[in-house]
Amino acid sequence: MGNKLLGACCGMMVTVMLATPTTLAHAESNDEPNLHSQSAVLMSAKSGEILYDKQANEQMYPASITKIITGIMAIEYGNLDDVVTVSEEAVDVVGTSVFLLEDEEMALKQLVQGLLINSGNDAGTAIAEHMAGSEEAFAEDMNTFVKEKIGVNDSHFTNPHGLYDDDHYTTASDMAEITRYAMQNETFRDIVATEELDWEGEGWETTLYNHHQLVRDHEEVTGVKNGFVSQSGFTLVTTYETEEDELIAVNLNAPTNADIYNDTKRLLEYGVNTFDTKTMEEGRHFEDLNGKEYILERATSVTYEKDADLQFDIRNGALIIEDDDHIIRSEPLKEVGEEKAEKEAERPEEKEDELTFVDRLLQFFHLK
C-alpha cells in the first residue's frame, strides 16, 4: 500500500500514489540515479558541493518553488508583525489560494505561512504589494536579491508566486543555492517544516496541510516547496537531514507528480548511501612536519565519497584536503606564533592605557 498524496501546485490539484515512507533513503545501491526530471541537482548544504547534476544549468520554469525567494525576502526584509491589507489584485490571482478577501487584514507572518505551506498565490501577491508596492517592483527586488545577496546569475523572476511567464526562469543549480541560503534562516526553516497549521481568515477557516508530501511523511525531511504549471511540469525542492549534513535535492520538469517525488527519493537515497561530510570547526589546531602549529581561521566542511581515502596536508600555510591526489578543498591557516605575536603587539598599548589611568587617579588623590 502507498500513501495518498493530495498535492497542490500552481492552480492544480493532483492525486497520486507514492511508495511507503520507510523506503526513503534506505536503498543499498550507490549508483547514480536514473531520473525522469529534465533537470536536477543534489547539493551538500554544509559544504556547498554538487554531488549530482543533470543539466543543472539549463534554464527552466520554476512554478511555485519561486515562493522560496518570496518567503525568505519577506522574512528578512519585512516586519512579520505588520498588518497587510489585501488588494483586489491579490484576491483575483489565479491558481492555488488561501482564499483571501479584498480589504481583509492579515499579519505578514500568516501570509508567509499561507504562501509556503499552502502555496497561496494570493498570499504571494499580497506580500509583494505590501513590501514593494506591486508585483513588478517586487520582482525587480527578487532579481537583485538573488544576484547580489545569494550570488546566482542564471535566474530571472517576474512575479512572486511562479505563475508562468516566458521571462520567469531559474536553474536547478541556482535553486539549490537559493535554498541553501534560505534554510540558514530559522524562521524560514520552521515554516517550511510545518506539517499542519490551523488557519483563520475572513474567507477561510481550516487546517492547512503542507503540500510537500515528504515533509509530512518523513522526520528527516525539513522542507521545502513543490510546484506545477503546465509549462514547467512538476517541480520540487527538498531538504533532508543526515547525521553530519543536510542534503538539498532540486528536481525540475518531471512529467508527473509521482515522478517528481520518486526522483527526489532516488536522489536522496543516492546522497545518503554514497557521501559523507566532515566539518572542522574554526580554531582547530594543526601541526606540520616541522612542528609549526596552525589554527583554522574559519569553519570548513568537505563532502566526499564514503570509500574515499581522504588526506589532510599543510602546504604554504594552508590546509589541503585531498582524495587520491585530487585537491578537494584548500583552506587558509594562521600560524600560532603569528597569532601570539599579534596579541603581544597589542599588550603594550593596553598597559600604557592602564598606567595612564592609574597615574591620573594618583594625581587626583595627590599621591603622585
Image (tube, helix red, strand yellow):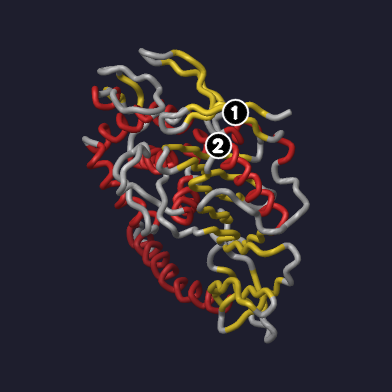
Q: In the picture, residue 82 is in which quadrant?
A: top left
Please state which of residues 118 and 37 is positioned toward the viewer in this rendering. Answer: 37
Q: Sequence order check: which comes first, mark 2 or mark 1?
A: 1
Q: Amino acid at mark 2?
A: Asn
Which residue does the image show at 55% across and 24% down from the upper left?
196
* Circle on res. 319: none
Q: In the picture, residue 304 is in which quadrant?
A: bottom right
Q: Amino acid at mark 1?
A: Leu
Please state which of residues 68 and 262 is positioned toward the viewer in this rendering. Answer: 262
Q: Residues within 10 Å of mark 1 (few under 14, many from 20)?
A: some
As drawn, the residue found furthest toward the bottom would be: 290
* Circle on res. 5: 1
Which residue does the image show at 72% across and 69% down from the upper left?
308
Please state which of residues 39 and 86 is positioned toward the viewer in this rendering. Answer: 39
Q: CA distance from mark 2 to mark 1?
A: 9 Å
Q: In the picture, residue 123 is in which quadrant?
A: top left
Q: Name the spot of residue 164 as percent of width and height, x first.
A: 35, 40
Q: Name the spot of residue 280 as percent of width and height, x first.
A: 63, 63
* Disc 2 target residue: 257
Which quadrant, please, contains the C terminus?
A: bottom left
Element class at badge 1: strand
Determine whether 200 is above or below 50 in the image.
above
Which residue does the image show at 26% across and 18% down from the upper left?
102
Which quadrant, please, contains the N terminus?
A: top right
Q: Residues within 10 Å of mark 2 (few under 14, many from 20)?
A: many
Label 2 close to label 1 by CB (< 8 Å) = yes
Determine whether 234 is above or below 7 in the image.
below
Q: Name the spot of residue 32 as percent of width and height, x first.
A: 66, 58
Which residue does the image show at 52% across and 28% down from the upper left?
14
Element class at badge 2: helix
